[in-house]
Image (spheres, rainbow, N blue to C red):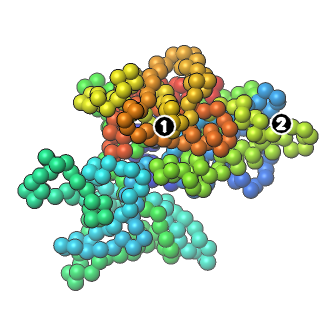
Protein backbone atom coordinates (compact mmCIF):
# COMPACT_ATOMS: atom_id res chain seq x y z
CA UNK A 1 0.00 0.00 0.00
CA UNK A 2 1.42 3.38 -1.04
CA UNK A 3 2.00 5.68 1.93
CA UNK A 4 0.39 8.67 0.20
CA UNK A 5 -2.73 6.68 -0.72
CA UNK A 6 -3.00 5.60 2.91
CA UNK A 7 -2.62 9.21 4.14
CA UNK A 8 -5.19 10.51 1.66
CA UNK A 9 -7.75 7.77 2.36
CA UNK A 10 -7.45 7.68 6.17
CA UNK A 11 -9.52 10.79 6.82
CA UNK A 12 -11.15 9.53 10.04
CA UNK A 13 -10.17 6.73 12.46
CA UNK A 14 -12.91 4.56 10.89
CA UNK A 15 -11.40 5.13 7.47
CA UNK A 16 -7.94 4.30 8.83
CA UNK A 17 -9.22 0.96 10.05
CA UNK A 18 -11.12 0.27 6.83
CA UNK A 19 -7.92 0.96 4.86
CA UNK A 20 -5.88 -1.30 7.12
CA UNK A 21 -8.52 -4.02 7.01
CA UNK A 22 -8.59 -3.95 3.20
CA UNK A 23 -4.79 -4.18 3.03
CA UNK A 24 -4.60 -7.09 5.47
CA UNK A 25 -7.44 -9.01 3.81
CA UNK A 26 -5.85 -8.51 0.38
CA UNK A 27 -2.65 -10.08 1.76
CA UNK A 28 -4.30 -13.25 3.02
CA UNK A 29 -5.32 -12.24 6.54
CA UNK A 30 -8.72 -13.64 7.56
CA UNK A 31 -11.19 -11.55 9.53
CA UNK A 32 -12.37 -13.10 12.77
CA UNK A 33 -14.65 -12.04 15.58
CA UNK A 34 -13.76 -12.69 19.22
CA UNK A 35 -17.03 -14.59 19.54
CA UNK A 36 -16.73 -16.95 16.58
CA UNK A 37 -14.67 -19.57 18.41
CA UNK A 38 -13.27 -21.01 15.17
CA UNK A 39 -9.92 -22.82 15.26
CA UNK A 40 -6.79 -20.82 14.43
CA UNK A 41 -4.31 -22.41 12.03
CA UNK A 42 -0.53 -22.42 12.42
CA UNK A 43 1.17 -19.95 10.10
CA UNK A 44 -2.16 -18.28 9.23
CA UNK A 45 -2.93 -14.60 9.80
CA UNK A 46 -6.01 -12.92 11.24
CA UNK A 47 -7.54 -9.51 11.86
CA UNK A 48 -9.94 -8.51 14.63
CA UNK A 49 -11.82 -5.22 14.28
CA UNK A 50 -13.51 -3.28 17.08
CA UNK A 51 -14.96 0.01 15.78
CA UNK A 52 -12.03 2.20 14.79
CA UNK A 53 -9.43 -0.14 16.29
CA UNK A 54 -7.88 -3.23 14.72
CA UNK A 55 -5.57 -6.04 15.79
CA UNK A 56 -3.69 -8.00 13.09
CA UNK A 57 -1.89 -11.18 14.04
CA UNK A 58 0.30 -13.70 12.24
CA UNK A 59 0.43 -17.12 13.89
CA UNK A 60 3.76 -18.95 14.28
CA UNK A 61 4.49 -22.16 12.39
CA UNK A 62 4.28 -23.97 15.71
CA UNK A 63 3.35 -23.01 19.26
CA UNK A 64 5.80 -24.36 21.82
CA UNK A 65 7.52 -23.33 25.05
CA UNK A 66 9.69 -20.87 23.11
CA UNK A 67 6.66 -19.00 21.72
CA UNK A 68 6.38 -15.28 22.55
CA UNK A 69 4.46 -12.25 21.27
CA UNK A 70 6.16 -9.53 19.22
CA UNK A 71 3.92 -6.49 19.23
CA UNK A 72 3.90 -3.20 17.34
CA UNK A 73 1.44 -0.65 18.77
CA UNK A 74 0.11 2.46 17.02
CA UNK A 75 -3.02 4.61 16.96
CA UNK A 76 -5.60 5.32 14.25
CA UNK A 77 -6.90 8.67 15.52
CA UNK A 78 -5.58 12.23 15.24
CA UNK A 79 -6.61 15.64 16.59
CA UNK A 80 -9.73 16.89 14.80
CA UNK A 81 -12.92 18.91 15.02
CA UNK A 82 -15.92 16.64 15.59
CA UNK A 83 -19.32 17.85 14.37
CA UNK A 84 -21.52 18.21 17.45
CA UNK A 85 -24.88 16.36 17.75
CA UNK A 86 -26.99 19.50 17.13
CA UNK A 87 -24.56 21.54 15.05
CA UNK A 88 -26.84 23.80 13.03
CA UNK A 89 -26.62 27.60 13.35
CA UNK A 90 -26.96 30.52 10.96
CA UNK A 91 -25.12 33.82 11.03
CA UNK A 92 -24.56 36.61 8.51
CA UNK A 93 -25.97 34.72 5.58
CA UNK A 94 -24.20 31.43 6.22
CA UNK A 95 -25.17 28.10 7.75
CA UNK A 96 -22.51 26.99 10.19
CA UNK A 97 -21.69 23.68 11.84
CA UNK A 98 -20.64 23.69 15.45
CA UNK A 99 -17.76 21.31 16.18
CA UNK A 100 -16.21 19.95 19.37
CA UNK A 101 -12.48 19.79 19.80
CA UNK A 102 -11.11 16.22 19.65
CA UNK A 103 -7.65 15.84 21.18
CA UNK A 104 -5.19 18.75 21.13
CA UNK A 105 -5.03 20.32 17.69
CA UNK A 106 -3.14 23.56 17.03
CA UNK A 107 -6.32 25.63 16.77
CA UNK A 108 -5.08 28.31 14.40
CA UNK A 109 -3.98 25.69 11.86
CA UNK A 110 -7.67 24.91 11.21
CA UNK A 111 -8.40 28.38 9.86
CA UNK A 112 -8.49 29.03 6.11
CA UNK A 113 -8.14 25.36 5.20
CA UNK A 114 -10.28 23.34 2.79
CA UNK A 115 -12.15 21.06 5.18
CA UNK A 116 -13.71 17.75 4.23
CA UNK A 117 -16.07 15.79 6.49
CA UNK A 118 -15.92 12.07 7.17
CA UNK A 119 -16.84 9.44 9.71
CA UNK A 120 -19.47 6.89 10.54
CA UNK A 121 -23.24 7.02 9.98
CA UNK A 122 -25.54 4.87 12.14
CA UNK A 123 -28.91 4.17 10.53
CA UNK A 124 -32.01 2.03 10.92
CA UNK A 125 -32.84 -0.66 8.39
CA UNK A 126 -35.60 -3.18 9.04
CA UNK A 127 -35.58 -2.37 12.74
CA UNK A 128 -31.82 -2.93 13.16
CA UNK A 129 -28.95 -0.48 13.58
CA UNK A 130 -26.38 -0.60 10.81
CA UNK A 131 -23.37 1.57 9.97
CA UNK A 132 -21.86 3.08 6.87
CA UNK A 133 -18.62 4.96 6.31
CA UNK A 134 -19.08 8.48 5.05
CA UNK A 135 -16.64 10.66 3.16
CA UNK A 136 -18.42 13.77 1.96
CA UNK A 137 -17.58 15.29 -1.41
CA UNK A 138 -17.95 18.99 -0.48
CA UNK A 139 -15.50 21.44 1.11
CA UNK A 140 -16.24 23.60 4.15
CA UNK A 141 -14.23 26.41 5.72
CA UNK A 142 -13.44 28.27 8.94
CA UNK A 143 -12.29 31.68 7.71
CA UNK A 144 -9.89 33.81 9.76
CA UNK A 145 -10.61 37.46 10.49
CA UNK A 146 -9.06 39.87 7.99
CA UNK A 147 -5.98 41.66 9.31
CA UNK A 148 -7.88 44.97 8.94
CA UNK A 149 -10.46 43.72 11.45
CA UNK A 150 -7.85 42.21 13.77
CA UNK A 151 -4.98 44.68 13.81
CA UNK A 152 -3.05 43.01 16.60
CA UNK A 153 -2.91 39.57 14.97
CA UNK A 154 0.75 39.68 14.00
CA UNK A 155 1.87 41.06 17.37
CA UNK A 156 -0.40 38.95 19.59
CA UNK A 157 -0.63 35.78 17.51
CA UNK A 158 -3.83 34.19 16.23
CA UNK A 159 -6.06 33.72 19.26
CA UNK A 160 -8.78 31.14 18.65
CA UNK A 161 -11.79 30.90 20.94
CA UNK A 162 -12.81 27.28 20.28
CA UNK A 163 -16.45 27.82 21.26
CA UNK A 164 -16.94 30.92 19.13
CA UNK A 165 -14.60 30.08 16.27
CA UNK A 166 -15.12 26.38 15.64
CA UNK A 167 -18.28 26.90 13.60
CA UNK A 168 -17.50 25.83 10.06
CA UNK A 169 -19.28 27.58 7.19
CA UNK A 170 -20.88 24.85 5.12
CA UNK A 171 -23.45 26.54 2.90
CA UNK A 172 -25.16 29.87 2.35
CA UNK A 173 -28.30 30.43 4.40
CA UNK A 174 -31.73 30.04 2.85
CA UNK A 175 -33.73 33.18 1.99
CA UNK A 176 -35.88 32.81 5.13
CA UNK A 177 -32.74 32.70 7.29
CA UNK A 178 -33.48 29.23 8.67
CA UNK A 179 -30.58 26.90 9.40
CA UNK A 180 -30.31 23.98 7.01
CA UNK A 181 -30.02 20.71 8.91
CA UNK A 182 -26.68 18.97 8.50
CA UNK A 183 -28.41 15.70 9.43
CA UNK A 184 -30.60 16.11 6.33
CA UNK A 185 -27.46 16.43 4.22
CA UNK A 186 -26.09 13.27 5.84
CA UNK A 187 -29.39 11.50 5.18
CA UNK A 188 -28.98 12.56 1.55
CA UNK A 189 -25.50 10.98 1.49
CA UNK A 190 -26.93 7.81 3.03
CA UNK A 191 -29.64 7.69 0.35
CA UNK A 192 -32.04 4.77 0.41
CA UNK A 193 -29.80 2.60 2.62
CA UNK A 194 -31.91 3.48 5.65
CA UNK A 195 -33.02 6.15 8.12
CA UNK A 196 -30.17 8.08 9.74
CA UNK A 197 -30.25 7.81 13.54
CA UNK A 198 -26.89 9.18 14.62
CA UNK A 199 -23.39 10.00 13.40
CA UNK A 200 -19.74 10.40 14.37
CA UNK A 201 -18.47 12.83 11.76
CA UNK A 202 -15.37 14.98 11.92
CA UNK A 203 -13.76 17.62 9.74
CA UNK A 204 -10.41 16.91 8.10
CA UNK A 205 -7.79 18.65 5.98
CA UNK A 206 -8.75 17.88 2.38
CA UNK A 207 -5.37 18.76 0.86
CA UNK A 208 -3.60 15.61 -0.34
CA UNK A 209 -0.16 14.62 0.98
CA UNK A 210 2.76 16.05 -0.98
CA UNK A 211 6.51 15.67 -1.31
CA UNK A 212 8.48 18.75 -0.26
CA UNK A 213 12.03 20.04 -0.01
CA UNK A 214 14.41 20.77 -2.88
CA UNK A 215 15.35 17.09 -3.08
CA UNK A 216 11.83 15.83 -2.37
CA UNK A 217 13.16 14.61 0.97
CA UNK A 218 10.17 15.65 3.08
CA UNK A 219 6.51 14.71 3.32
CA UNK A 220 3.82 17.30 4.06
CA UNK A 221 0.43 15.91 5.09
CA UNK A 222 -2.35 15.96 7.61
CA UNK A 223 -2.54 13.12 10.16
CA UNK A 224 1.11 12.00 9.96
CA UNK A 225 0.76 11.52 13.75
CA UNK A 226 0.05 8.64 13.78
CA UNK A 227 -0.74 7.36 10.29
CA UNK A 228 3.00 7.14 9.66
CA UNK A 229 3.31 4.50 12.38
CA UNK A 230 0.12 2.68 11.30
CA UNK A 231 1.41 2.44 7.74
CA UNK A 232 4.87 1.26 8.82
CA UNK A 233 3.46 -1.42 11.15
CA UNK A 234 0.99 -2.66 8.52
CA UNK A 235 3.61 -2.75 5.76
CA UNK A 236 6.02 -4.64 7.99
CA UNK A 237 3.44 -7.21 9.08
CA UNK A 238 1.95 -7.91 5.64
CA UNK A 239 5.47 -8.28 4.25
CA UNK A 240 6.55 -10.75 6.93
CA UNK A 241 6.54 -14.54 6.80
CA UNK A 242 5.25 -16.64 9.69
CA UNK A 243 7.85 -16.93 12.47
CA UNK A 244 8.99 -20.37 13.63
CA UNK A 245 7.68 -19.85 17.18
CA UNK A 246 6.49 -16.29 17.71
CA UNK A 247 3.17 -14.51 17.25
CA UNK A 248 3.66 -11.27 15.30
CA UNK A 249 1.01 -8.71 16.21
CA UNK A 250 0.19 -5.15 15.17
CA UNK A 251 -2.38 -3.34 17.29
CA UNK A 252 -3.98 -0.15 16.00
CA UNK A 253 -5.81 1.63 18.81
CA UNK A 254 -8.35 4.42 18.63
CA UNK A 255 -8.62 7.37 21.05
CA UNK A 256 -4.95 7.86 21.92
CA UNK A 257 -5.39 11.59 21.41
CA UNK A 258 -7.98 11.77 24.20
CA UNK A 259 -6.21 9.58 26.76
CA UNK A 260 -6.94 6.00 25.58
CA UNK A 261 -9.47 5.15 28.33
CA UNK A 262 -12.10 3.78 25.95
CA UNK A 263 -13.33 0.46 24.59
CA UNK A 264 -11.25 0.93 21.46
CA UNK A 265 -8.32 2.60 23.24
CA UNK A 266 -5.08 1.32 24.74
CA UNK A 267 -6.58 1.62 28.23
CA UNK A 268 -9.36 -0.82 27.25
CA UNK A 269 -9.38 -4.58 27.01
CA UNK A 270 -9.08 -4.99 23.22
CA UNK A 271 -5.56 -6.40 22.98
CA UNK A 272 -5.90 -8.60 26.06
CA UNK A 273 -9.20 -9.98 24.72
CA UNK A 274 -7.64 -10.87 21.37
CA UNK A 275 -4.48 -12.37 22.84
CA UNK A 276 -6.49 -14.36 25.38
CA UNK A 277 -8.77 -15.70 22.66
CA UNK A 278 -5.77 -16.71 20.57
CA UNK A 279 -3.81 -18.17 23.48
CA UNK A 280 -6.81 -20.19 24.70
CA UNK A 281 -7.53 -21.42 21.17
CA UNK A 282 -3.99 -22.68 20.51
CA UNK A 283 -3.87 -24.36 23.93
CA UNK A 284 -7.34 -25.91 23.74
CA UNK A 285 -7.29 -29.50 24.95
CA UNK A 286 -3.80 -29.17 26.49
CA UNK A 287 -3.33 -29.37 30.23
CA UNK A 288 -0.89 -27.38 32.34
CA UNK A 289 -0.04 -24.81 29.66
CA UNK A 290 1.72 -21.59 30.68
CA UNK A 291 -0.61 -18.64 31.34
CA UNK A 292 -0.91 -15.75 28.89
CA UNK A 293 0.38 -13.34 31.55
CA UNK A 294 3.55 -15.36 31.95
CA UNK A 295 4.13 -15.35 28.17
CA UNK A 296 3.48 -11.59 27.93
CA UNK A 297 6.08 -10.96 30.60
CA UNK A 298 8.62 -12.63 28.30
CA UNK A 299 7.34 -10.84 25.18
CA UNK A 300 8.29 -7.46 23.70
CA UNK A 301 6.37 -4.45 22.36
CA UNK A 302 7.40 -1.49 20.23
CA UNK A 303 5.06 1.44 20.86
CA UNK A 304 5.31 3.51 17.70
CA UNK A 305 4.17 7.13 17.70
CA UNK A 306 5.32 10.48 16.39
CA UNK A 307 8.42 12.13 17.92
CA UNK A 308 9.37 15.82 18.12
CA UNK A 309 12.19 16.76 15.78
CA UNK A 310 14.12 19.86 16.79
CA UNK A 311 12.72 22.96 15.04
CA UNK A 312 15.47 24.77 13.08
CA UNK A 313 14.01 28.16 14.10
CA UNK A 314 13.51 27.15 17.74
CA UNK A 315 16.35 24.82 18.80
CA UNK A 316 16.01 26.16 22.38
CA UNK A 317 12.81 24.11 22.79
CA UNK A 318 14.86 20.88 22.95
CA UNK A 319 17.54 19.75 25.36
CA UNK A 320 20.84 20.22 23.50
CA UNK A 321 21.89 16.59 23.82
CA UNK A 322 18.47 15.24 22.87
CA UNK A 323 17.59 17.06 19.68
CA UNK A 324 16.53 14.54 17.02
CA UNK A 325 16.53 15.93 13.47
CA UNK A 326 14.38 15.22 10.44
CA UNK A 327 16.08 12.59 8.33
CA UNK A 328 18.32 11.50 11.21
CA UNK A 329 16.64 8.14 11.85
CA UNK A 330 14.27 6.57 14.35
CA UNK A 331 13.76 8.27 17.72
CA UNK A 332 13.92 6.47 21.07
CA UNK A 333 11.66 8.32 23.53
CA UNK A 334 12.35 8.14 27.25
CA UNK A 335 10.96 10.06 30.21
CA UNK A 336 11.95 9.81 33.86
CA UNK A 337 8.31 10.52 34.91
CA UNK A 338 7.37 7.42 32.85
CA UNK A 339 5.21 9.20 30.30
CA UNK A 340 6.99 6.75 27.98
CA UNK A 341 7.40 3.04 28.71
CA UNK A 342 11.06 2.83 27.67
CA UNK A 343 13.58 1.63 30.26
CA UNK A 344 17.21 0.53 29.97
CA UNK A 345 16.51 -3.09 29.10
CA UNK A 346 13.78 -2.46 26.51
CA UNK A 347 15.86 0.42 25.07
CA UNK A 348 18.88 -1.87 24.84
CA UNK A 349 16.81 -4.41 22.90
CA UNK A 350 15.79 -1.63 20.52
CA UNK A 351 19.42 -0.56 20.08
CA UNK A 352 20.33 -4.12 19.07
CA UNK A 353 17.42 -4.25 16.64
CA UNK A 354 18.50 -0.92 15.07
CA UNK A 355 22.07 -2.18 14.70
CA UNK A 356 20.82 -5.36 13.08
CA UNK A 357 18.57 -3.39 10.70
CA UNK A 358 21.20 -0.76 9.95
CA UNK A 359 19.06 2.24 10.91
CA UNK A 360 20.30 5.24 12.89
CA UNK A 361 18.82 5.87 16.34
CA UNK A 362 18.34 9.29 17.94
CA UNK A 363 17.13 9.93 21.49
CA UNK A 364 14.55 12.32 22.84
CA UNK A 365 13.82 13.51 26.36
CA UNK A 366 11.63 16.52 27.08
CA UNK A 367 13.28 19.52 28.75
CA UNK A 368 12.80 19.54 32.55
CA UNK A 369 10.96 22.86 32.34
CA UNK A 370 8.33 21.57 29.88
CA UNK A 371 5.67 18.88 30.40
CA UNK A 372 6.08 15.70 28.36
CA UNK A 373 3.37 14.15 26.15
CA UNK A 374 2.56 10.47 26.30
CA UNK A 375 1.31 7.64 24.10
CA UNK A 376 -0.06 4.09 24.21
CA UNK A 377 3.19 2.49 25.47
CA UNK A 378 2.74 3.13 29.21
CA UNK A 379 -0.95 1.98 29.24
CA UNK A 380 -0.31 -1.26 27.39
CA UNK A 381 2.91 -2.04 29.19
CA UNK A 382 1.40 -1.51 32.64
CA UNK A 383 -1.88 -3.32 31.91
CA UNK A 384 -0.36 -6.38 30.22
CA UNK A 385 3.10 -6.50 31.82
CA UNK A 386 4.88 -6.49 28.44
CA UNK A 387 8.36 -4.94 28.34
CA UNK A 388 7.92 -1.99 25.95
CA UNK A 389 9.96 0.71 24.29
CA UNK A 390 8.53 3.96 22.90
CA UNK A 391 9.84 4.98 19.51
CA UNK A 392 8.78 7.19 16.61
CA UNK A 393 9.52 9.00 13.38
CA UNK A 394 10.75 12.58 14.00
CA UNK A 395 8.35 15.27 12.75
CA UNK A 396 7.67 18.99 12.85
CA UNK A 397 4.35 20.79 13.44
CA UNK A 398 2.94 17.88 15.45
CA UNK A 399 -0.85 18.30 15.91
CA UNK A 400 -1.04 20.99 13.24
CA UNK A 401 -3.70 20.23 10.63
CA UNK A 402 -0.71 19.68 8.32
CA UNK A 403 2.48 18.10 9.65
CA UNK A 404 5.91 17.41 8.20
CA UNK A 405 8.26 14.44 8.32
CA UNK A 406 11.22 13.04 6.37
CA UNK A 407 10.61 10.29 3.82
CA UNK A 408 13.83 8.49 4.84
CA UNK A 409 12.75 8.23 8.48
CA UNK A 410 9.48 6.62 7.42
CA UNK A 411 11.37 4.14 5.23
CA UNK A 412 13.66 3.38 8.19
CA UNK A 413 10.63 2.70 10.38
CA UNK A 414 9.20 0.25 7.83
CA UNK A 415 12.57 -1.55 7.67
CA UNK A 416 12.95 -1.61 11.46
CA UNK A 417 9.50 -3.11 12.02
CA UNK A 418 10.02 -5.60 9.19
CA UNK A 419 13.22 -6.75 10.92
CA UNK A 420 11.34 -6.92 14.24
CA UNK A 421 8.79 -9.31 12.72
CA UNK A 422 11.45 -11.33 10.85
ZN1 LIG B 1 0.37 10.25 18.31
Which residue occupies the extreme left position in the image? 148
Q: Distance between the Cα atoms at labels 1 and 2? A: 32 Å
Q: In which quarter of the image is the C terminus?
A: top right
Which residue: 57% across, 51% down? 265
Q: Position of residue 322 (x, y in %)?
A: 40, 24
Residue pointed to by mark 1: 305
Q: In this view, does 181 lie to the left or right of 336?
A: left
Q: Tags 1 and 2 in contact by the CB under 8 Å rule?
A: no
Q: In this view, does 420 lie to the left or right of 189?
A: right
Q: Where is residue 99 in the image (x, y as percent from the top left)?
A: 36, 63
Where residue 290 is drawn, which disc sits there? Answer: 2
Foreground of the two, 55 or 267: 267
Q: Residues within 10 Å of mark 2 (few under 14, many from 20)?
A: few
Mark 2 element type: loop
Q: Is mark 1 within 8 Å of ligand 1?
A: yes
Placement of 34 over or under 67, stated as above or below? below
Amino acid sequence: MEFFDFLNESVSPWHTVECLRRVFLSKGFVERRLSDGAALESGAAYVFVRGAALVALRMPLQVNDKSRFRLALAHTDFPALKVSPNPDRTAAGACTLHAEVYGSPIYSSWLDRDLGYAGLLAFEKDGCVQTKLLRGSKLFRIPSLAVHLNRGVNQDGTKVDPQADFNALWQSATADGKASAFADALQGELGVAGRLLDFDVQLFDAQPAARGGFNDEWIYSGRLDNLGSCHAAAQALVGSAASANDFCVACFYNNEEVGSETREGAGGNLLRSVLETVWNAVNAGKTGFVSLSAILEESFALSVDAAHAVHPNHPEKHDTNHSPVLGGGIVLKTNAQKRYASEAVSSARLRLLCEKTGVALQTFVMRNDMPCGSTVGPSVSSALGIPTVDIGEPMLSMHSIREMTAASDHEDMVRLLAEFFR
